[in-house]
Amino acid sequence: MTMHKSKGLEFPFCFYPGLEKSYNLKDIHQGTLFDKAYGLVLKANFDGFIDTIWHKLIRYKQKKAAISEKIRLFYVALTRTKEKMFFVLNKARCKEFEITYENNYISPSIRSGFRMYHDFFDALSLTNAWEVPNAYDYHRALFVSKKHEVHAVEPIRFETIEVLPKKIVQTHFSKSMKRWMDETTKQSIQQGKRLHKVFETFDFSQPSIAFNTLNPENAFYIKRFLSHPELKSIEQATVYQEYPFTQTLQETAKMGVIDLLIVYQDHIDIFDYKLKNISDEAYIMQLKGYQDYIHDLTQKPVNIYLYSIIDDVIQSLGGKT
């Protein structure tokens, strides 16, 4: 794909061919140019049409802008990779020249000389250990002698693998609600969402600092929650909030989001927030599903809890060792 189309995407490995293609700067060499600062510039006529000083100023300005845009575009391309990038370079075209810097940047006089992406690498101090020589002998494969003798190469072998599609049914651990709601119920749900957002965004790993960002009402609810003995050592644990996961079992994929996952050295605690009611059997089944998944994943003892924000009650649903 092009560099423009890759914007916003990420890949484990990225290969960068075509780095020797020259930039298209034809537009700046036209006889008639326009610039917001200099206006419309035409050629002068002295026994024939010739460029003026305005042409040189505009071309310098536009070339600088075009190369700057290419540098920004190349930055976009380089930041698409998550693990490793591979540059296909022609070592015979690599140049060696002294690099000068201005304000920790490669000087404009050098950058303005870039005519292709390949030139970027001449301005970098590449580590020799990064270089991987081409292991394939193109002359052996492509050279045709005067007698039209084509040197043999090992044939490419293809293997076809048929992958049959398999339908996966997606479900959720949490229960769904499909019923008519009166205005009081709607307001209660809105309050639950608001308080849930407070708990979701609060930094439990640094509570003393995070409290500075809360208003008194929200701080009241968080302080009440942290005052429970089950949370006394949370600052010594690794905390995950709104932890999403998918559990695949045969032809079913169950998805869930754990409100608060607290990983200690010897065990794990899972908390699920509810506005008030924590006696629903569906909540217990939901937490049991979370518990089974995390236990299978970590092989650590896992405790599960329901917390009523309004009533300030923590209900333990047991542990799994």
Image (cartoon, rainbow, N blue to C red):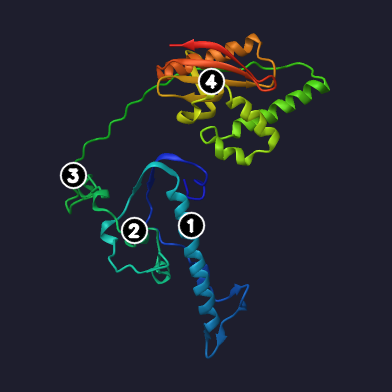
**Gap in Å between the C-alphas at discs 3 and 1?**
44 Å
Query: In front: mark 3 or mark 4?
Result: 4
Quadrant (top left, top right, bottom left, bottom right) of the C terminus: top left
Q: Earlier in the sequence, mark 3 or mark 4?
A: 3
The residue identified by callout 1 is: 72
Contact between marks 4 and 2 (CB within 8 A): the answer is: no
Q: Residue at x 51, y 33 (%)?
A: 205
| Residue 197 appears in view | yes
Contact between marks 3 and 1 (CB within 8 A): the answer is: no
Contact between marks 2 and 3 (CB within 8 A): the answer is: no
Disc assigned to residue 151: 3
The residue identified by callout 4 is: 230
**Gap in Å between the C-alphas at discs 2 and 1?**
15 Å
Amino acid, disc 3:
His
**Dot 1: what SS?**
helix
Residue 308, by quadrant, is: top right
Q: Residue at x 62, y 13 (%)?
A: 283
**Gap in Å between the C-alphas at discs 1 and 4?**
50 Å
Q: Position of residue 145 (x, y in %)?
A: 18, 52
Dot 4 surroundings within 10 Å: few (below 14), some, or many (20 or more)?
few
Q: Position of residue 44 (x, y in %)?
A: 56, 86
